[in-house]
Image (cartoon, grey):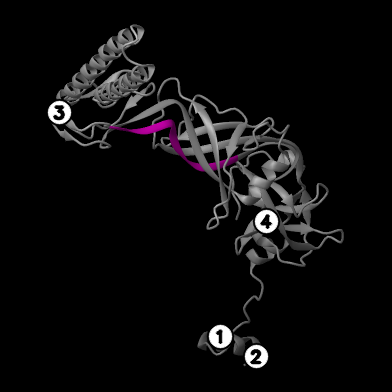
Amino acid sequence: MNVSKILVTLLALGCLCLPACQTHEGESEDEHHKIVVTSPKVQDVVLNQQYVCQIHSRRHIKVCAMANGYLKDIRVNEGQAVKKGDVMFKILPTLYKAKWDAESAEAKLAKLELNFTKGLSRDKVVSQNEVALYEAKLAKATAKAKLAEAELNFTEVKAPFDGIVDRLEQQLGSLIKEGEVLTTLSDNSVMWVYFNVPEARYLDYKARQGMPTENAQLLKLPDARIELRLAGGNLFEYGAGDTVTVEGEFNKETGNIAFRADFPNPKNLLRHGQTGNVLIHRPQKNALVIPQRATFEILDKQYVWVIDKDGEIHQRQIVVQNEIDDLYVIKSGLAPDDKFVLEGVRQVHDGDKRECEFMKPEEAMKNLKHHAE
């Protein structure tokens, strides 16, 4: 039997195996696949910074009773707009009216006594000391009458400013005690919007501040635009200008400081207690931007693959200043002339040398609907 017949016989019996291919076709293609690199782009951008906020009325007070008695009349409804001086509640004034009448009568009597004594003084019947005594008596009686009148006026609860009535806390006929809350009143003409800013961001704002204002608590952000996004996602139609109020101290637990932006509210859309997000849009010239898809994250830090002058690929950490759509504004870690991997981020390793195809930054910024890996 010749050799070829012997080999055929062994293969048929399964006694001989041919060696498998050690290199997969796909791996070979990946190994020689070109990667796309580009450089950062220098351009003017608008930085968008967002903060959760609480919306408060400029004036929001508790309207309380200043006299005891039964609630006689309620002249407002919940949610009603009132003007300054409008009577909102009336408390039964019987006792206060009787007291005022009595004190007024005492004042009239004291005045008559004074006039009579003055006549006697002119006739040299009584001395000037007697006149002074009755003048003091009249002054005391007049003061008591004015106090009784003030207490009577307290039975009418009036609006201290233009505003909107909130929930009614008492019902008609209720026995009211002095100091008891009847409702709350909100002045919504201007809304105070509070949001917390980290210390590092606060220092950045101070460093970029324009001309200092006369009020040390006011912070002016030159060229900035402050907007309010409501809970439904819509932007409030009125802006807050470029000036905010800064509170006097940092929160020791969070390291934040509270800012306040004032928003006009002519249509009364905003109400006390609403929530939303404050958006601060601030232009920055000659910012360094890269596509998000060129980055990858390790332990909450951002990295890119950078090609050095010898053509080797190395991992480099970057610090992101801000995020704009599908771009990152770079604070540190890259220079305008650096080259980094744009396509094929997952196909390279530290120290690799790969065949690269360079894409201009302008082209790389197109079709950016891809995020970081």
The residue labelled by disc 4 is 344
Quadrant assignment for the N terminus:
bottom right
The residue labelled by disc 3 is 172
Q: Earlier in the sequence, mark 4 or mark 3?
A: 3
Q: Earlier in the sequence, mark 3 or mark 2?
A: 2
The residue labelled by disc 1 is 11
Residue 282 falls in image quadrant = top right
At label 3, the amino acid type is: Leu
Answer above or below: position of 349 versus 42: below
Q: Earlier in the sequence, mark 1 or mark 4?
A: 1
At label 4, the amino acid type is: Gly
- In this orientation, which residue lies closer to the viewer: 135 or 330? 135
Q: Secondary structure at mark 1?
A: helix
Region of the chain picked out in magenta, as a range: 49-64
Q: Is residue 291 visible?
A: no
Give the residue furthest to the left.
173
Q: Magenta part mainly helix, strand or loop?
A: strand
- In this orientation, which residue lies closer to the viewer: 75 or 277? 75
Q: Is residue 337 left or right of residue 327?
A: right
